[in-house]
Amino acid sequence: MERLTAQQVYNNLVKGYGTPRWWPGTPYEIMVSAILVQNTAWTQVEKVFAAWGEPEPAKVLAMPVEQLQETIRPCGFMKAKAATIRTVTEWYREYGFDIEQARTVDQDRLRRELLGLKGIGAETADAMLVFALHKPSFVIDAYTRRFLDRMGYGFSDDRQIRRFFESGLPADYQVYGRYHWLLLEHGKNHCRKQPVCECCVFSEVCPGRAL
C-alpha cells in the first residue's frame, strides 16, 4: 500500500480534528512552558501559570532559585526545570529579551544555541523555534514517532522523520505548529499506546490498526 504524503496526513488530520489550537502565551511564556511540560501533563503547566501569572524574564532571573522551584513544583523535577528556565532566560537576555531581535537570527544558529543549553533537547528546542521564534523546525515527539510507526513508514531515526515532513510541506512555521498540535490530538484520542481505531481518520489505510 502506498504511504500517504506529509501533506495528505495533514489534510486527514484537519478533516478529523478541525482547525488546531496554537501554543498559548507570550513568546517567553512559551519558552518556559516548553520546559515545564517535559514529562508532565499540560494541566500541570496550566496550574503553574494560573498561580504565577505572566512570568517576566528579568524578574525570573532576580527571583531566588528556591522560590522559582516552589513556583513550578506542580510540574515535577522542579530543581532541574528551574535550572533550565534560568539558563534559557540567560540565553534570551543575550537578545535583550527582545523576541523580534532573536527572530532575525538564522534558524540553524538558533537551534544550535538552544541545543547547547543544559536541559534543552531536540523536541523542546524545536517547540521553542516554531511557537516562540517563528522558525519552521518540525517538532518530533513520542506521539509523532508512534503514529508513523503504526502507519508503516519504517523510519529508522528522527532525521528521516524530519526529512519526510520538511521535504513534503511548505517551510511555514504556522503549518508546522498546527501539525504538531494535530498529531498531539490524534495521539491522545486515537493513536494511544493501546490504539482506539474506531472512527479514526486513518483506519482504512493504517496497517497497524487494531482488527
Image: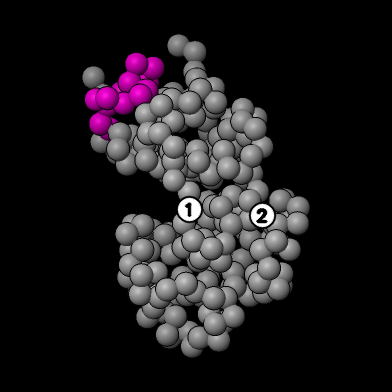
State the CA–CA distance, disc 1 to disc 2: 19 Å
The segment highlighted magenta reads 195-209
Residues packed near mark 2 inside 10 Å, few (<14), some (14 to 19) or many (20 plus): some
Return the residue at label 2: 111
Q: How many marks?
A: 2
* Residue at position x 58%, y 33% in the image: 165
Is residue 207 highlighted in magenta?
Answer: yes
Compared to residue 199, the image places residue 64 above or below, namely: below
The answer to whether residue 198 is seen in the rendering is yes
Is residue 186 highlighted in magenta?
Answer: no
Majority SS type along the magenta span: loop
Return the residue at label 1: 23
Which is closer to the viewer, label 1 or label 2? 1
Asked if the residue at tag 2 contacts the one at tag 1, i.e. Cβ–Cβ closer than 8 Å, the answer is no
* Element type at mark 1: loop
Residue 120 as seen in the image, left or right of residue 101:
left
| Amino acid found under the numbered disc labelled 2 | Arg
Expressed as whole percent of the image width and height from the top left, the position of residue 70 reads 37, 80
Expressed as whole percent of the image width and height from the top left, the position of residue 49 reads 39, 69
Most extreme residue toward the top is 1
Expressed as whole percent of the image width and height from the top left, the position of residue 163 reads 62, 33
* Residue at position x 55%, y 26% in the image: 7
| Amino acid found under the numbered disc labelled 1 | Trp
Residue 199 as seen in the image, left or right of residue 52:
left
